[in-house]
Amino acid sequence: MSATTSPLPRTGSRPGGRSARIRAAVHRAVEELLADETGELLTIPVVAARAGVHATTVYRRWGSVGELLTDVATSRFSGDIVVPDTGSLREDLERYASDLAKDLNDPDTLPLVRATIGTAGEQGASACTRERRQQLQAILEREQTRGHQTPTVERVMDAVLAPLYYRAVFTDQALTPEWARTLVSHLLPD
Amino acid sequence: MSATTSPLPRTGSRPGGRSARIRAAVHRAVEELLADETGELLTIPVVAARAGVHATTVYRRWGSVGELLTDVATSRFSGDIVVPDTGSLREDLERYASDLAKDLNDPDTLPLVRATIGTAGEQGASACTRERRQQLQAILEREQTRGHQTPTVERVMDAVLAPLYYRAVFTDQALTPEWARTLVSHLLPD
DNA sequence: TTTAAAAGGCAATGATCAGTGCGATACTGA
DNA sequence: TCAGTATCGCACTGATCATTGCCTTTTAAA
């Protein structure tokens, strides 16, 4: 259980190499099994069978379901949203919030978030949102470079990010782009 | 897997009866195992052993870990917070938010929320927050009875409830009462 | 091309899990 | 008190899981 070592092998990490192919297949298997929502429990043998690899391989590369889910979540929530750059803070945030709402509405996303939180605890939870914080930070810093005042990142997270994730995880309400933009207008009045 | 039948037995449900004692012991075992944070996976045999009952009993009364967690979460998050009634909406919300922050800071609470979400999905998630919505609704309705305008429940959930749960579940930031009150002051400016 | 290291496939093992009859015990209502 | 019913403990069973040693294949560098 070496939490610091990457599940990426030091060698064999060429884009189309065998290791990379296995990694992709396992990731896809996890997402499919979670999306299937058959209530079937997510175990390493099940994932391995679905991915067409041997369970041993998954045990050795990832160690546990928790670490596997953390890895899948990290990939899934990295680089999936392009941070908008419209020149206006309000516009940037509105587009970002509405993109995020669309992303969280993807039927594959929610089960992954829930499973990762439940199985991988702190590690998993931060894997789902670490990049979001950085993206908001980037939007704010650009606005500051333009010489304008901005709310703190914490404030934006409370006002925009939190409601999006809360609704997705805890309720069955739909995350509409209109509502997402409303969150921004409450944060930036007038 | 009868999702509608209550895990409470029809007979033997007297306060101090054996069924009630077993139920309490199982609930306590779940919370302790989650709080222990040994990374040990939560299975029915493990819970049963800790509670001093036979696994068969747990299988028959709850059926699965998911339903068990949903039941525990429902108990845990029902009647645990006294809805304040100060005569002022702002004061009510501030106390409520600060009480909720304290509740979510309890080391036993967070693992229960995470595990329930991860294992029991939609069912589990709503078990963690259903009562919160009703409590906020009650606070708002009292203010309306006094003849005052109030935000919608959805707005209060977005502005107060969501940040509290988001911070608890997704970050490692502490939930201070001061910050919780700040959320209310952003919702009710002037 | 050759060679050493890394990763994956395979088979086998002990441990744990989910689920099932059956008899004993505890509870409810008459 | 007493009968009927529900719940629980107990002893199994088959299935699945986590893990290991050994060998083959792939990979990266000489």
Image: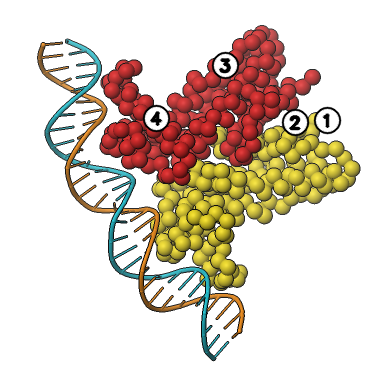
Chain colours: A yellow, B red, C cyan, D orange
Residue at mark 3 to residue at mark 4: CA–CA distance:
24 Å
Give amino acid for label 3. Val
The residue that label 2 is drawn on is A186
Q: Are marks 2 and 3 on the same chain?
A: no
Residue B97, visible in the rendered structure: yes
Disc 4 vs disc 1: Cβ atoms closer than 8 Å?
no
Front in this rendered view, residue B172 or A136: B172
- Corner quadrant of residue A53: bottom left
Residue A51, visible in the rendered structure: no
Residue occupying image coordinates x 43% and y 50%: A42
Q: Are marks 4 and 2 on the same chain?
A: no
The residue that label 1 is drawn on is A190
Residue at mark 1 to residue at mark 3: CA–CA distance:
34 Å
- Corner quadrant of residue A54: bottom left
Q: Are marks 1 and 2 on the same chain?
A: yes
Relative placement, left or right, of B107 versus C23 is right
